[in-house]
Image: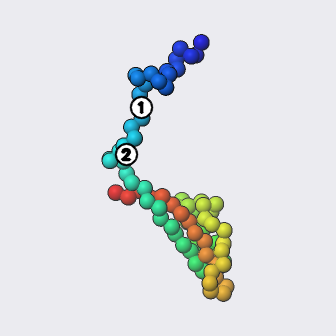
Amino acid sequence: MTTNFLSSADDPNTPVPSKTADKTAPLREPLKHLLIGSPKAVTGTIHYLQVLGYADVGDWSPLLPSPNPGEVMSILSRQILVQ
């Protein structure tokens, strides 16, 4: 019974989504934040940015060793609107 509501893909009256990009849509661009410091400083900053509502703790990479002894780093990748 529901087949009466479905159109055939071969039907010339079936609307086709536009393949051209909408020129008025805002563009999104990747942005990476990199925190480098002691494990305490990096972890504290990640938690502070969550309190501010900027990024959840889970959005950051795990703490990674940096080239400098005693330092770690964490990366946050975001897509931001570019106008």
Residue nearer the viewer, 24 or 60 = 24
Give x and y (percent) for residue 42. Answer: 61, 75
- Residue 68 sits in quarter: bottom right
What is the crowding at mark 2: few (fewer than 14 residues within 10 Å), some, or many (at least 20)?
few
- Residue 58 sits in quarter: bottom right
Residue at image point 52% right, 20% down: 6
Residue nearer the viewer, 57 or 7 = 7
**Secondary structure state at the residue bearing disc 1:** loop
Question: What amino acid is at disc 1?
Answer: Val
- Which residue position is annotated with label 2? 21
Residue at image point 32% right, 47% down: 24
Give x and y (percent) for residue 61. Answer: 63, 66
Up the image or down, 38 lies above or below 76; here it is below
Residue at image point 56% right, 61% down: 55
- Which residue position is annotated with label 1? 16
Residue nearer the viewer, 71 or 21 = 21
Q: Earlier in the sequence, mark 1 or mark 2?
A: 1
Residue nearer the viewer, 59 or 22 = 22
Residue 29 shown left or right of residue 59 in the figure: left
Give x and y (percent) for residue 67. Answer: 62, 84
**Secondary structure state at the residue bearing disc 2:** loop
Q: Nearer the viewer, mark 1 or mark 2?
A: 1
Of the 4 image quadrants, the one containing the C terminus is bottom left
Up the image or down, 39 lies above or below 13; here it is below
What is the crowding at mark 1: few (fewer than 14 residues within 10 Å), some, or many (at least 20)?
few
Residue 36 shown left or right of residue 17 in the figure: right
Residue 36 shows up from this direction: yes
Up the image or down, 68 lies above or below 10; here it is below
